[in-house]
Amino acid sequence: MKLDAQELQAITVPAPITAVAELIDLFETHRSQGRVWAYRGQSRPFGSLQPSFQRQFTRPSSATAELIERHLVQAFRDHYAKLPDRHSDMPNTQQIDAFHTLRCLSVMQHYEIPTRLLDWSASYWTSLYFACASDPGEDAELWFYDRSIFIEQVTQDGRWSALLDASPQPPAEPAYLYQPGVPALVELDPKISPRMRTQQGHHTVASEVFSDHARLIRTLDLERQKLDAASGFEAQPHFGRVTITAACKSRALQFLAEHHQITASSIFPDVVGLGRFLRWQFDSLRTMLL
């Protein structure tokens, strides 16, 4: 279920961003708060946070989607193990085996296979690039959440720390997919592929395939605000969204290239990523010129 119009309005900064100076101001505001933020840029104002796998289905059937997902995961493992030109800095087969299915999905996402994972970045500027690098005629949106909202999961059950373990030999992941009664949304941060490391990326993963991550993060946000208030702290939002006007996109990209050296070549350190960028470029030029 998606956020309704009132809920979306409650987490969205009222005024759209129209200038690079406003983007800098937002970054400075977040940095001054001393909180650990995660960011996601989307090139159009979807008003939701839906993974690519979910968007492939015109009719939401969880049983069918899970059956397809299981098949894709096993097929990927079988073929990945036989790849003759697998890059040396990609994970070995043991790191994506049956005890590490979420990590397997992360590697699949690296190879452009639709998964239920949703990408986030610790880098404000990298996420801004993703918001502005395509769909030049559309407004963009930048989502962000305070990663402390997930801290209770690890505090209450240390097994969830395995999902944040970036070591070469991580412990087995706790049962999560296809398991009733587990948390509805978790963070996965294995830094398992070159692209994730370059982009300072991690994922959120919902236990239900067709979940809108925006609603689940909003629920965690409200729960954390209640805990803060009960503990005598000022209740502050931990989740938000801003829109960026289409006219601001090209100026933002120029600023990122000149002042932060963020371009396609800097954040896509592989051929697969380059191909993805060029497809974006094709769509952008077609939109602009035709």
Image (cartoon, rainbow, N blue to C red):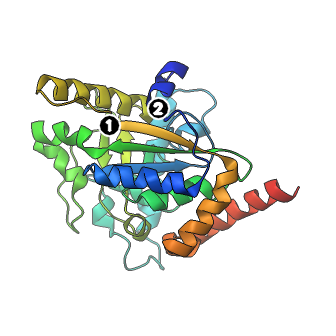
* For marks 1 and 2 on the same chain, the one whose residue lies earlier in the sequence: 2
Q: Is residue 33 visible?
A: yes
Question: Is 62 above or below relative to 279?
Answer: above
Mark 2 neighbour density, 10 Å: few (under 14) some (14–19) many (20 or more)? some
Q: Quadrant of the C terminus?
A: bottom right
- Whether residue 172 sits left or right of residue 87 in the image: it is left
Q: Position of residue 143 (x, y in %)?
A: 46, 43
Q: Residue at x 30, y 57 (%)?
A: 97
Q: From the viewer's side, name the closer residue of 209 and 261.
A: 261
Residue at 50% in and 42% down: 51
Q: Quadrant of residue 202?
A: bottom left
Residue 44 placement (x, y as % from top left): 63, 44
Label 1 sits on what residue type?
A: His
- Disc 1 designates what residue? 238
Q: Nearer the viewer, residue 243 or 118?
A: 243
Disc 2 designates what residue?
212
Instruction: Name which residue type carries label 2.
Output: Asp
Asked which secondary structure carries label 1, the reply is loop
Q: Is residue 73 shown to the viewer in this render? A: no
Mark 1 vs 2: CB contact within 8 A: no
At a point 34% along the width and 69% down the height, the residue shown is 91
Q: Which is in the foreground here, disc 1 or disc 2?
A: 1
Crowdedness near tag 1: few (<14), some (14–19) or many (≥20) residues, C-alpha within 10 Å: many
Q: In the rendered view, would you say 288 is above or below 145?
A: below
